[in-house]
Image (tube, rainbow, N blue to C red):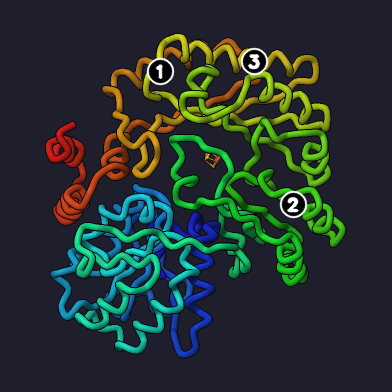
Amino acid sequence: MCYPNSYYSGMSNLGFQNLFHRASLFHGLQVHRFFIERDGILHSPDLPGEPGRVLGAYDALFFSLSFELDYIHMLSMLKASNIPMEREERVEGRPLIAAGGVAVTANPGILSSFADILYLGDMECGLEELITIMIESDFRCSVASLRAFAHINGAYVPAVHGMEPVAKATLPAVGEPAHTVVLTGNTEFSNMFLIEIGRGCRNSCSFCMTRCVNRPLRSVDGRVVVEKAERVLAFTRRVGLIAPVLTDHRDLPGIVRQLNGMGMTVSFSSLRADDFNADIAMLLSDNGQKTVTFAPETGSEVLRRNIGKRLQDEALLDAVRTAMGYGIRRFRYYLMIGLPGETSHDIGAIVELVRKTVQLFSPHGAQLMLSINPFVPKMGTGMESARLYPMEYYETVRASLMQDFSGLEGVEYRFESFKKLYLHYYLSIGDDRIGRLLGQCIGEGSLRGFPAAAAGIMGY
Ligand code: SF4
């Protein structure tokens, strides 16, 4: 099992933990985890005594990819193990390479020259069948085995299907939720038992890849969540509830109260401001949650409406007020710049929204952290055909916002670096040609020329 990022981030990724868990249940199958660290070195925590073992020694490699920039790390992992990146160049098709996850489901074209199997949608629908066929065919990439893979629900096999991806597989209900199977202190959510309580989202933000890939909304039975948490009581008392939007689960308060009743404290991953109420605020406060995060996305209600986010400023400010009433003093807003149709009025509206928020902080004092990212269109979403602005636009907006925020007490901000913006963009909306270009650049050891070459291929 390969996670194209560090151990620290991989072990907080429920998709990866779920994949590792399900594959490990197979009798007779030896499953090891591999990560690529910042220094480009591969490591496996399952092989402490064998630091030299590389991926080429395995019959099959499974990659779990949530983010487009992880394609770079995936191909770097192959390169570091001397495995030919291009599918057709691997001798006798070994090792077999399968990839899945949110990024792959949204845009399978990018990896279609590299992976033998791209799994689209909910892995639970086809993983067992996939591994069974692998074992039965002795992990050979023969015409017969590829045809057999191609019949599995959600399995896109480029050698059989050509450039036409199959429909994603969708579980009708999430009966067995993804959860932590390896607890570790060396990860973002240190020693916390993470468990999904819902897949999909009932909202319709047109920029959102999660919504497109994970739809429809399916809530996990609260009794299952509580029962799973009960089993880890001897190891940890910290539980993290995971869902695209936690408040989409009708029984969220009931689940949290039961977990609290067992002596566990709960962390909340994502909340919508317009669902926020005193009941939720009290639960957060009782569980010691210090920070509440909301995602207004942009400052202007009109632009927000245009991107499918139905949130009024007043609802957001009400949510902040309510949380403050329960002693919460730290807030985080996720915002985007560079949305299609954005004007200087919309940028001014961001500042205005921040101003109105900090006015609520007086006289108690509180802190607002702004996380500001450039908008990147995602394949499969309603905004996939949007374009980026020239780099100067982002730099000008950043400078102007920094100036406007500088006089506001209690406001901190973090702009995502623009360094990889165009790289990210072409990996998000590109096709197999962009994938091959990426492979070529990684093979040559430099991504410097990638954006310009990608622009030449795509024609924009
Ligand atoms: S609420 Fe969040 S998860 Fe749901 S569609 Fe909007 S951005 Fe996506």
Q: Position of residue 342 (x, y in %)?
A: 40, 18
Q: Who comes first in sequence, dot 2 or dot 1?
A: 2
Quadrant of res 255 = bottom right
Residue at image location 50% in from the left, 56% down from the top = 8
Q: Is mark 1 within 8 Å of ligand 1?
A: no
Q: Amino acid at mark 3?
A: Glu
Q: Earlier in the sequence, mark 2 or mark 3?
A: 2
Which amino acid is tagged 1?
Glu
Question: Where is residue 87 shown, x and y percent of the image?
Answer: 19, 68
Q: Label 1 crowding class (10 Å Cα cut-off): few <14, some 14-19, many 20+?
A: few
Q: Can you tell which of label 2 and label 3 is closer to the viewer?
A: 2
Question: Does dot 3 land on a helix, a strand or a loop?
Answer: loop
**Of 381 and 94, which appears nearest the observer?**
381
Give the residue number, with chain letter if any, for mark 2: 266
Residue at which label 1 appears: 342
Look at discs 3 and 1 and give the one toward the viewer: 1
Relative vertical location of residue 14 with respect to residue 204 in this rendering, above or below: below
Which residue is label 3 attached to? 409
* Mark 2 vs mark 3, CA separation in Å: 31 Å
Mark 2 nearby-residue class (10 Å; few <14, some 14–19, many ≥20): many
